[in-house]
Image (cartoon, rainbow, N blue to C red):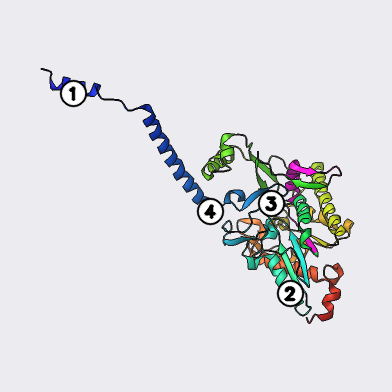
Amino acid sequence: MPSLLQTASVKITGKKKKPVWKYLLFFLIILFLTFTMLEGIARVLVFFYKDLPMEKKRIICHDITLHHAWVSSKKSIDSNRSIPYPLIINKQGWVEQYDVTVEKPKDTYRIFYLGDSNTQGVVAPEYKMVEIVEKMLNEKYSGSGIKFEVINTGTSSYSCILYYLLSKQIMKYSPDLVVLNIDMTDVPNDFLYRRTAVRKENNDYVAVHPDLNSKYIMTPHGFVKYKTGKSLISKLSRYSDFMFFVDRFVSEYLCKKEIDDSSADWLALNWTDEIKNNVNESMKIITMNVEFLRKNNVRAMITGIPYYKQYTGSFSEKPHEALQETAAKLKVPFLNSYLVLENKIKGSSMTDYYWDNDDSHFNIAGNKLWAQAQFEFICNPANNLLPFGRLNKKTAN
């Protein structure tokens, strides 16, 4: 008669093994649930990660002509500054709270502001420079019978080459005046965008295709290429927020962060021949833009956006001089914002007019100050930027 130990041994050895596929299925289910949980956490973090590129917040999308653009008909909250603000995009992909009609209403004078995030305004809608200018113009000329419609097309990381392409697109909206707000990142951004630019035989720009194989961190002095885009992780990061964080941290924090190319850094105190050449390329694009606008009977105005460190001497003020020289050659009105705002900003605390964590973007007070300078310049008859003949007939102010 077998002992209890022998009986147990027989039962154990005789027990059927589970098929391998069941273990594999169990493993895959656990893996799927884990990834789903991590992806969910990552998507929540998207709204709090301040250094997250705009495209991962799903408010910026690729554009076959303009490289990238705001996602149309989108509302979101930008919390990158100490005061979060609503970012509202209309169906045209512009920073406006209404959809602009293609047909210009009767007795309307349309002004388009072209620029990057500074023109966009990193403040609530009512505090944006463009909105303030529109309000002031309509108040000043309230008795003229003319309504001023000032349209904000400012888009993060845009530059001279994209302003030119955008000028072509807005022609169907019958602009009367186009204001080119040139940012201090525009020359290095132009340098980057020219890599994927499409030009005709006559060298006219027709598009800047998005570079889907590379990612860049834009800085005022140049760009940092933080991934080649050819790895599986990088490809997956376009669709997965979790994989994006993996890609971002591996690329940015485990690798040495350096400017890949500073040959377009026009904020440098000393300009090399390479910097001068890149500045000249951007000035040529501005020239192309102004000439295009003139051919279409559209008034043009140029101005530059001053950074706080230009007033402290850390950054060069030469960019504004280059813009003034270009405007003089074109005989187009130029607002030297750097000089006009100098008395207020130079010697002030950075947080008086700029954000505490960002010395390149105006805060609420800075937008108001800048709007006043723009308004006064536009209203100056010597600059011939408004239809003063019609305005002076009925203006009560």
The kind of residue tagged 3 is Ser
| Label whose residue precedes the other's in the sequence (4 or 1) | 1
Q: Which picture quadrant has residue 250? A: top right
- Find disc 4 in the rendering and name its residue: 47
Q: Is residue 263 visible?
A: no
Magenta residues (range): 177-203
As helix, strand or loop, the secondary structure at mark 4 comes to: loop
Q: Is residue 22 left or right of residue 43?
A: left
* Residue, far left: 1
Let me know if residue 194 is in the magenta part: yes
- Residue 254 is labelled as none
* Helix, strand or loop at mark 2: helix
Estimate the spatial distance between the alpha carbons at disc 2 and disc 4, rounded to whole Å: 37 Å
Type of residue at label 2? Answer: Asn
**Residue at the disc numbered 2:** 138
**Residue 70 location in percent, x, y?**
65, 54
Percent of width and height locating residue 192:
73, 44
**Residue type (three-letter) at the residue carrying disc 4:** Phe
Q: Residue furthest front?
A: 103
**Residue tagged by mark 3?**
157
**Residue 206, can we see it?**
yes
Q: Position of residue 102 (x, y in %)?
A: 74, 63
Sequence order check, earlier mark of 2 and 4: 4
Name the N-terminal-most of marks 2 and 3: 2
Disc 3 packing (10 Å; few <14; some 14–19; many ≥20): many
Q: Name the residue that disc number 1 marks.
A: 8
Q: Quadrant of the N terminus?
A: top left
Asked if residue 307 lies in the magenta stretch, the reply is no
